[in-house]
Amino acid sequence: MGGHASHIYFGLDAMWVSTILLAVTYAIIISEQVNRAIIALLGAAAMVIVGVMSQEEALKGVDWNTIGLLTGMMILVSISRRSGMFQYVAVWAAKAAKAHPAGILLLLQLTTAVLSALLDNVTTVLLMVPVTLAIVKELEVPPYPYLFAEIFASNIGGTATLIGDPPNILIGSQVGLDFNAFAIHLTPVVVVVLAVQTIMIHLLWGKDLKATPEREARVMAMRPEQAIADPLLLKQSLAVLTIVMVAFVLARPLHLEPATIAMAGAAVLMLLDNWTHHNEKASDNIHKTFGDVEWITIFFFIGLFIVVHGVETGGLLKLLADKLVAATGGNIAHAGYAILWASAVLSAIVDNIPFVATMIPLIKSMAPAYGGPDAILPLWWCLSLGACLGGNGTLIGASANLTVAGLAERSGVPFRFVTYTLYAFPMMLVSIAVAHIYVWWRYF
């Protein structure tokens, strides 16, 4: 590590320079004064320019598996969404609840949680919120409880799988944990947390929601099949998404990485879409599909990987890992609880993606003290549960929260930071308490 310091201007210490660059990058990201992708890329460029590491070393820090998985899933969802399948599911859920407001509140939460586990939470709320607003308008009930519940359900559901939430994609890719590992270790506790949250939301709002019989009849008159805009695309999307999900489950015996599966699925669905509309519309569809990819998120990840790799190269994370091991007296259970609660509280304050990106190499550095990579497996589940569930604590805790708030404000539904936090933070702490009991019972 000392070799890196000699390249730094004025002979400054690599650890201090990389730490200062990380702190400045994070401070500006948290301030939200400048787009986070721009700041992450500037921070990454600064790491190379001042000599913390070479460009070649910087690119080694980028986890292309994460980038490929994110991009592939964004393309798959962009094309599938055009078929209308997700709107169909939401309207079907409202009718299955017999248009009763409290029943709709429950079923929309369950639908959001399941979709978040299979897609990702930002995409899920983008699909669910407009339909939810249409349903509550017909019922003449307040939209806030429904939107609040969908934020919680999306972040809880996304915790259950490798592809549900960006922190899980990061952990899975950088630690080598597959789709099945997340499903086996996290789905049981996610089901319990979701049940607890739906009960709390019912007691808080659901039991008081009422609609007139005439209003309920209007919702029952809605026809889910009218949401299907392209029946052929629906069949193609369902076929490709099913194959992609099966491939995720069988990734290990197939010797395939998640990025390969997602990108192959995306390419096949784009080909089918292009084949069907073999005219000028085909070109428009391709442009629209690539336009739907959240390039801001992709480049934010690339910049962030390089910034964190610079700090890792500088030696700060190894130092912090040693201190954390010493502080927990070498007891892995204490380390797990510390990671769970610290991740939850900090992920509510800062975006959970940069937090997790910094924590991964830190926890990896702790492996030798606890007996190797296999011994620290429970620590990864503590990090995932803390970061994903903790994101519910405030409006800025996770991208899905801000997405819902933006859609709500645009539709004239006020979504205040303080109001949300007063409800959400205590409820988030309850879900972390449930997770604490689970990791104690299962791992420690």
Image (spheres, grey):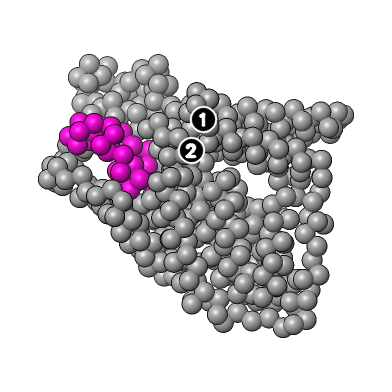
Which of the pair 243/393 is nearer the observer? 243
Q: Is residue 380 magenta?
A: yes
Q: Amino acid at mark 1?
A: Ala
Residue 150: x and y in percent read: 56, 61
Task: Tell which residue pokes out farthest to the right in this image.
Answer: 279
**In the rendered view of the protein, which quadrant contains the N terminus?**
top left
Quarter-of-image position of residue 75: top right
Q: How many marks?
A: 2
Magenta-drawn segment: 355-384
**Residue in view at x 60 percent, y 29 percent:** 263
Quarter-of-image position of residue 232: top right
Q: Is residue 152 magenta?
A: no
Which of the pair 415/430 is nearer the observer? 430
Query: Disc number at residue 179?
Result: 2
Residue position for label 1 = 251
Residue 211: x and y in percent read: 68, 81
Is 381 situated above or below 277? below
